[in-house]
Image (cartoon, rainbow, N blue to C red):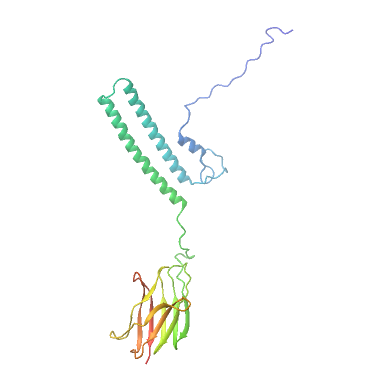
Amino acid sequence: MATKGESRKPERLRRSDPERGGAKRSPTDHMRNHAGSGNGNGGNKPPGGPKSPVSETLQTAIIDIVGLSSEVIEDQIRAGQTAAERLRDGIAGSERLNKDVTALVEGLVATTKDVGATWLELLSIVLRSVGKPPATPEMPGGGHPPPRTKTKTGSSGGAATTSSMTPADPTVEPVPLDIVVSGYGVKSVTLDLRPPTKRFEPFVRKLQGPDPKYDLTTVKFTLDHKDQLVLAVIGPRGQYPGTYAGVVVNSNTNEPGGTVSVVIGD
């Protein structure tokens, strides 16, 4: 039979309580401990951990604004507690309390402006991080690709025709217009169309001849029997011979977008 001394249980070993400087409840501490950098080694995460979906610059901005917001809220809470304590102490309506409330409101307004400015800075960083819309593709040596030009030659009404299209918009397919010639004396027609926008509606004003006294007004853009836009040229009987040239403009804005020339013979 065991004696009383033999049945005593051994004393349990205990570790000393670790020294603590207080609980770390700061939101910025929490974010720093859980945010990974762009290379996967941010915060307290081990190297090679999962990468963060945001850049280190963006993380820093977010941490800063959270910290600022936290400080603002804590300052206003402390100021409110001070005012409440003085109210309970029986100084309601006193000049001192009024100063405290005024200072509280002024501080709230000032710090709110700081938070707003920081938010604007954060949004700016986010926009830069997301990136800009894709621009026009550049050439390997730098710069943008040259405008594409397509030319079609032929004949109509006994006149040689040359029609070229060079759209300023690289997404627009260059399709030269047909040239339809009728009437008398037309030897050749050259159309160089360079529309600056997709909504360009070509219009030809009168063409100027070699002598300012003579012009040609029978050149216009119209639709053919297939509802396709064509350049129609009519050679009037007895037209003074020579080269007549003019500018193609937008019918709505008068913005230039090409040239046209017509050679009239004897």
Q: The N terminus lies in which quarter of the figure?
A: top right
Residue 93, quarter of picture: top left
Among all residues in the image, which is located at the extreme front?
A: 225
x then y, percent, for residue 97: 28, 26
Count of marks, rendered view: 0
Tell me which corner region of the image, top left, top right, bottom left or bottom right, holds residue 215. bottom left
Decide: is 94 above or below 125: above
Image vertical order of residue 187 relative to residue 48, above or below = below
* Residue 118 x/y as whole percent: 38, 43
Closest to the observer, 68 or 10:
68
Q: Nearer the viewer, residue 62 or 47?
A: 62
Up/down of 172 relative to 63, above or below: below
The answer to whether 133 is drawn above or below residue 207 in the figure is above
Where residue 90 appears, x then y in whole percent? 30, 20
* Rendered residue at 30%/30% (across/down): 101
Pick the quarter of the image with the C terminus: bottom left
Residue nearest the observer in this picture, 235 or 67: 235
Point 41% across, 77% down: residue:
222
Q: At 39% from the left edge and 72% from the top edge, which residue is drawn?
A: 201
* Residue lying at the far bottom of the rendered structure: 266
Q: Position of residue 165 (x, y in %)?
A: 44, 75
Tell whether 250 sits left or right of 146.
Answer: left
The extreme left residue here reads: 95
